[in-house]
Image (tube, rainbow, N blue to C red):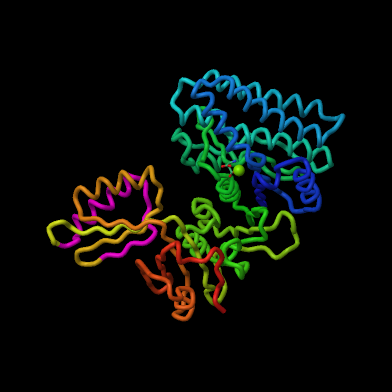
Amino acid sequence: MTTVFKFGGASIRDAAAIRHLGELLAGVRTRPLVVVVSAMGKTTNALEALLAAARRGDNADYRTRLERLRHDHLATVEALFGDRAAPVTKRAAALFEELDRRHQCYRGEARPFHYDQTIGFGELLSSTIVNAWLNEIGVASDWHDARELVITDDCHQAANVDWRATTERIRGLGIAGDAVVLTQGFIGGTPEGISTTLGREGSDYSAAIFAHCLDAEEVVIWKDVPGLFNADPRRFTNAVQLERITYDEAIELAWHGAKVIHPKTLAPLRQKAIPLVVRSFEKPDAPPSIIAAEGPDAAIPAFILAEEQALVELHPRDFSFMDEPRLHDIFGRLAKAGLHAGLVDSGAARLSLCLDAHPARLDPLVASLACDYSLERYDALTLLTVRHPTDALLSALSGTRTILAERCNATTAQRLFLGSECPATWQIPS
Ligand code: ASP
Ligand code: MG
């Protein structure tokens, strides 16, 4: 059975990281093996800035940015291959020429289309370099173009996978044997061969697509953290690693704002009960975190913080009820503004919404709601979500802090605090 590995930008950010990846893969005997890679380091952000320069028509900035990207990639090739760099340099340089050509060609097109014809070059470059490096160190590897394997519609920047066509293409590779199947995350193509992308941070999803189509045994996501935690270790001093959680729990955590795994990644795996394993790139032998159909016997409390939240309290102006037509109206406006309410609480004549204080989206929404409802807004709030809470946990976490809104059901409790009353780092009560 096939195994799928995914390496993110951090794990291939420079020559040293790519060497480390090579050592890691040289030690892995599992075959067939599909390896999905992201763009190196922060390349995708740099490509987005390059796109902006191209669209502004700021040629000087465009040239500087393109040159910097070219320089960084070719320097990595140089550092890896030394006096054997020429053939790889040639391939990378050709990709830069093609990228430049596409920018010249598509700068007048709609942005989403222009985006998809250019932003995936980060992955094309990284996969070209990594593939050559693996072969250089004796790990046989074949480069495959994900734009010809992951078949999508033409909804640019958020393309939808055509599962039947994709399965056919991926199975058509006849993956077997010793060579690593090396491909790109994040990118796909239409049946006509037009490049598309799956959305930022889409490489995990790509790995899940390959796994789904191949009925893989597991997907391993190699990260620069040891695994998944029951809280963000940077904010909770005593966060603990989760050994195993269910797909459902992972989706709940992601929904409430934990930077776990994009929920889109989990659906194709869950459908075929393919486990997702998160391992440390730095410590490959450390115990991983596993997301699978079966979780632990006892639910483990988990904690999620969302900061810079706003509370919007709405009342009908005429003292009538906050009834279904009004809820329909308000949520319709939220959907239109692209805003998600992290906490919803309602009463007979009140609706309370906790929203991300995203000024460009929230301010116009608040202005429009204020025309039809009496509205109060509170800013600079922190939303704490606790999965599998106990009363003792909640009261210890809340202390004497002011609670502006709250919600609790059998599995999840949420409390909205004043940000100014919250600590910089939290302690999970024992
Ligand atoms: N390189 C893409 C991004 O940074 C895809 C990914 O890394 O998942 O969004
Ligand atoms: Mg990336």
The answer to which image quadrant residue 292 occupies is bottom right
Query: Which residue is farthest bottom?
Result: 392
Q: Is residue 79 left or right of residue 189?
A: right
Which residue lies at the image location 32% right of the left edge and 48% below the top edge?
A: 335
Which residue lies at the image location 40% right of the left edge and 74% below the top edge?
A: 410
Q: Position of residue 117 (x, y in %)?
A: 54, 28
Q: Position of residue 20 (x, y in %)?
A: 78, 48
Please provide the residue range marked out in magenta: 321-346
Q: Quadrant of ligand 1?
A: top right
Q: Is residue 74 left or right of residue 205?
A: right
The C terminus lies in quadrant: bottom right
Nearer to us in this view, 416 or 24 = 416
Nearer to us in this view, 187 or 76 = 76
The answer to which image quadrant residue 228 occupies is bottom right
Nearer to us in this view, 275 or 406 = 406
Q: Is residue 262 above or below residue 83?
A: below
Q: Is residue 223 inside the magenta stretch?
A: no
Q: Is residue 342 inside the magenta stretch?
A: yes
Q: Position of residue 235 (x, y in %)?
A: 57, 63
The N terminus lies in quadrant: bottom right
Q: Is residue 380 above or below residue 348?
A: above
The answer to which image quadrant residue 374 occupies is bottom left
Q: Position of residue 94 (x, y in %)?
A: 69, 23
